[in-house]
Image (cartoon, helix red, strand yellow):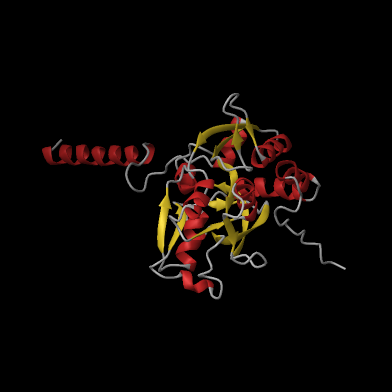
Amino acid sequence: MKTSAVIGIIALSVLIALGLQNFVLPQRGAGAPTAAKESTLERVMRTGTLRCGYAYYAPSLMKDPNTGAFSGYSYDLMNEIGKRLDLKIEWVEETGYGLIAESLASNRIDMFCAATAYDPHRAKRMNFSAPLFYVPIHVFVRADDKRFESDLATLDNAAFRVAVIDGDISDTLAKADFPKAQRVSLAQNVAHGQLFEELATGKADAIFSEPLLAARYQEHNPDAIRSLNPEHPARVTPIGFGLPHLDAGFKNMIDVTLQEIQNERFMPDLIAKYTGRPDTFMPVTPPYAHVQ
């Protein structure tokens, strides 16, 4: 056989071998197929466990310093959700309200299980559950401060200070309503009551808060603070749980369970247990409430 023919046969054999290798072996690089990432719903169903992140905020979630036992309406509600879904609830990570999205994205937690105000800035990076209830948010000033009586817009001035907690709804509202005012920023892990102290001691001229927390502060500090307009809150905000971004299946499971709970007496009884009265917060109105 001629040398040129031999070389041709060898070359053809190499090409065939390379073709078979490319056909049989998995492709590598940008176009290579990868294993599908396990969703939160799939992981929770596989393990039978829902891992909760949380932050302390009475009466939503509290911890006994002596026993370490949790309590609060968020704690009881999550246990009820776990019961109805036949899931174990594990409280695995304390995180600040400003770090909810990061904790969810890292997959260290499956859900942020403490009551959380809806916030558009958070919504860009995480989901929210269906509302548990609605909360009125008021602007509070010192009891003897009359500077903002005639016009709340007077606060929107660089001469005045609004105390906020970083990453909290108070920070969002201050930026939206009083962008020109100075913000006195407190760390995420401080107790909400510190806002009232900043106001009462003159370190701030105004704060945002819900009436329940203000009332508890006023019990021990009468005539220290007051709402600028008790009959008309600055906001009424929905409160829910924090969920992973872009995980519709998991959100659907939690929302359907909450809907079942909302159709019963569980929520008003739960709120009354921790606040003393069932109308502390504004309830979610059933969609059929106005049907004749």
Which residue is outermost to the right?
Answer: 292
| Residue 45 visible in the picture | yes
Residue 164 pos. (x, y %): 46, 55
Residue 133 versus residue 273: which sits nearer the camera? 273
Q: Quadrant of the N terminus?
A: top left
Q: Is residue 193 left or right of residue 216?
A: left
Q: Nearer the viewer, residue 277 or 227?
A: 227
> How far from the left and from the top, in percent, is residue 98?
46, 48
Quarter of the image where the C terminus is located: bottom right
- Residue plotted at (57% across, 56% down): 225
- Check the image and name the residue furthest to the top: 67
Answer whether residue 121 is visible to the viewer in this image: no
Furthest-bottom residue in view?
150
Left-right relation of 176 to 128: left
At which x and y percent is residue 60?
63, 43
Name the residue nearer the viewer: 167 or 202. Answer: 202
